[in-house]
Amino acid sequence: MNKLLCPSMMCANYGHLADEVRALDDAGCDIFHCDIMDGTFVPNFTMGVMDIQTIRRYTDKLVDCHLMIENPSSKVDWFIKAGADIVYIHPESERYVVKTLAHIKEMGAKAGIAVNPDTSVSSISEILNLCDYVLVMTVNPGFAGQSFIDFTRKKVKQLVELKQEYGFKVMIDGHCSPEVIDDLSALGADGFILGSSALFRKGKTYKQIIDDLRKENEDVK
């Protein structure tokens, strides 16, 4: 089974966003990954509701929103109504995590938890039954182009074992180079967020890169 390949839209060319979405869609990507940052939970600002609406307008593929914001419960409706199919929250940012995950599902979207490098699997074990996706951060959240944090492999292994019981998909976000994709695919990760390490500004077309990543994945199997 092919792994889910998900372009990180914070790395796209915003001068030609509609063209970028069409090209990535035609290239065969699976999920458009949208990072929402408020400058408080993480020290950066990125995408907003209008960006999600634009991406939704030009693709029928799944769109996810990774909410790196304080008190996401007050904002999840904005992004679901804008077209998000999957919404990730960070447990550290929300007082009532279970209530917020349940609300995301009640709104008709898939619910996800994002797990920072310094967040333990044991600390989220009680809420995994509400998660459709678990996003493992293999870098510290907030900026593209960071180095892979090696000890997060252990967390990936733990979550891959747990997904058999709970049914969620394990997604990887952070320095997803072709080598990291090969490595963590072999461990059982389901999908990868593709940024500057694998997809953007690489001198090839998006289709060439996506096709290469698919082929490499098949070769590993």
Image (cartoon, rainbow, N blue to C red):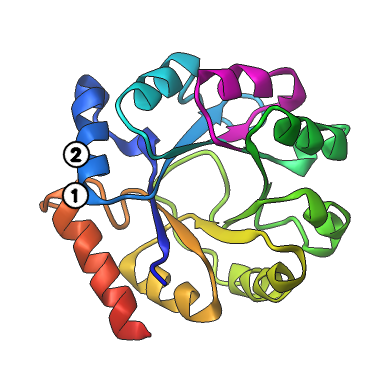
- Dot 1: what SS? helix
For badge 2, the amino acid type reads Ala
Residues at discs 1 and 2 in contact (Cβ within 8 Å): yes
Is residue 102 found inside the magenta-colored segment of the image? Answer: no
- Dot 2: what SS? helix
Label for residue 23? 2
Out of 161 and 124, give the one closest to the viewer: 161
For badge 1, the amino acid type reads Tyr
Q: Residues within 10 Å of mark 1 (few under 14, many from 20)?
A: many
* Residue occupied by mark 1: 206
Image quadrant in which the C terminus is located: bottom left
**Residue at left offset 32%, top offset 68%:** 178
Instruction: Residue 111: name its quadrant.
Output: top right
**Residue at left offset 74%, top offset 18%:** 74
Instruction: Residue 122: name its quadrant.
Output: bottom right
Q: Residues within 10 Å of mark 2 (few under 14, many from 20)?
A: some
Out of 204 and 101, give the one closest to the viewer: 101
The span shown in magenta is 66-86
Out of 185 and 116, give the one closest to the viewer: 185
Image quadrant in which the N terminus is located: bottom left
**Residue at left offset 77%, top offset 63%:** 121
- The answer to whether residue 15 is left or right of residue 195 is left
